Image (cartoon, helix red, strand yellow):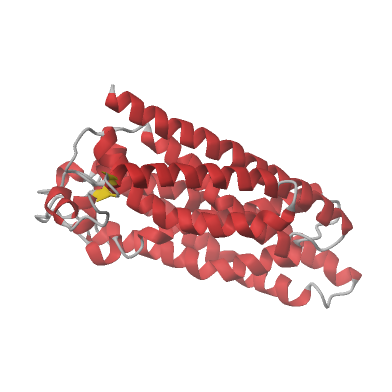
Amino acid sequence: MAFLIVTFGTLIMLLFSILAAGLAMLVFEKALRIFRWWSKADEEERYELEKEFYLTYAVVYIVFAIRMFAVPLYFWTMQTLVSMIPGAMCLWGVFNALPALCWSTLALKFALPVLCSGWLILARINQRAKRNPLIRNLMGLYIALSPLLMVDSLVDLMILSRLNPVQVACCTSAIDVWPRPIPPLVLGISGQLVLLVSYLALWTAYGLLCHVASRKPIFEWAARASSLALILMSIFTVTEVLTPWILNLPLHHCPFCLFYLAPTSIVFFATLWFSMAVPWWTLLTAKLGRTDAESGERESKLRRDLWTAASLLTIISVALIVTHLIVAAA
């Protein structure tokens, strides 16, 4: 397999993709055997399976760590290719050099780290317990996630091996010419301002919900529903308000330009991603992290800590967004 565009980043991504895929396949059969026979095994058989588990666990840990690290490395690598793709001004143009693969898998780049982190959180609960109570659940979750891991690695290999320095259209000739999804005025008030205030208000309410959920689990589903609404609302707010306002480019709406020209914005988006991931981590731990009294106790404490962290990071993120807007307007 030969690269049409060869850089340090593409070579490292190739290495990581091949390594992660190879390791994932190496231990899949062991993970399947442990999952199938653990609940049926007697004490002696469990001892043998547990020895296999430690090796499998270590390899799976490495695989998930590689795929999680590969996500920011992927975006950094693609950003370094901007100057090599004629017509590209940011990641938008690079993605358009191979749109079928790059755009269709973008959601996976954000969702897969949530799932991988969920497995690592469950592994943390298992580590703190005395008798590895989550062995079967950890192996079962790994088996369920294996297809996504393989697809992610395979797509990276296909993208990096097929990416050509072809002429592409830049973001300005694409997203900026689309009809704007929000009206200029809402009841005589700027539509952008209405969207921004609504967005910040929803984030603030979500932060409060996370705080309450850390003490009263009955509010966890309200927080999860809010996180889903925030995903869609974030897309509109970033393109329609934050990008043009922070960059002081009223007619420009490309979020990739925001991250490139105002790199500190990556900080508040990273914290927002963590906050939106917490409801699904806690759902995962609630379903798979309680197999006995000890693991249930440790899961409950960790779940409370995650909700508290989400609450604090949400408030910090809102403050950072407001700070960016004030600095841009000054």
Report x, y in % for residue 297: 83, 51
Report x, y in % for residue 30: 66, 69
Find residue 116 and report its image quarter. bottom right
Say which of 164 and 108 sits in front.
108
The image shows residue 260, relative to residue 17, as above or below, that is above
Report x, y in % for residue 26: 56, 65
Say which of 197 and 301 sits in front.
197
Say which of 241 and 93 sits in front.
241
Which residue occupies the extreme right position in the image? 43
Find residue 97 and report its image quarter. bottom left
Residue 62 shows in this picture: no
**157 relative position to 57: left or right:** left
Residue pictured at 52% horizontal, 33% vertical = 316
**266 relative position to 4: left or right:** right
Which residue occupies the extreme top position in the image? 330
Residue pictured at 19% horizontal, 36% vertical = 249
Q: Quadrant of the C terminus?
A: top left
Say which of 175 and 110 sits in front.
175
Residue pictured at 53% horizontal, 50% vertical = 276
Residue 289 shows in this picture: yes
Q: Quadrant of the N terminus?
A: bottom left
**250 relative position to 144: left or right:** left
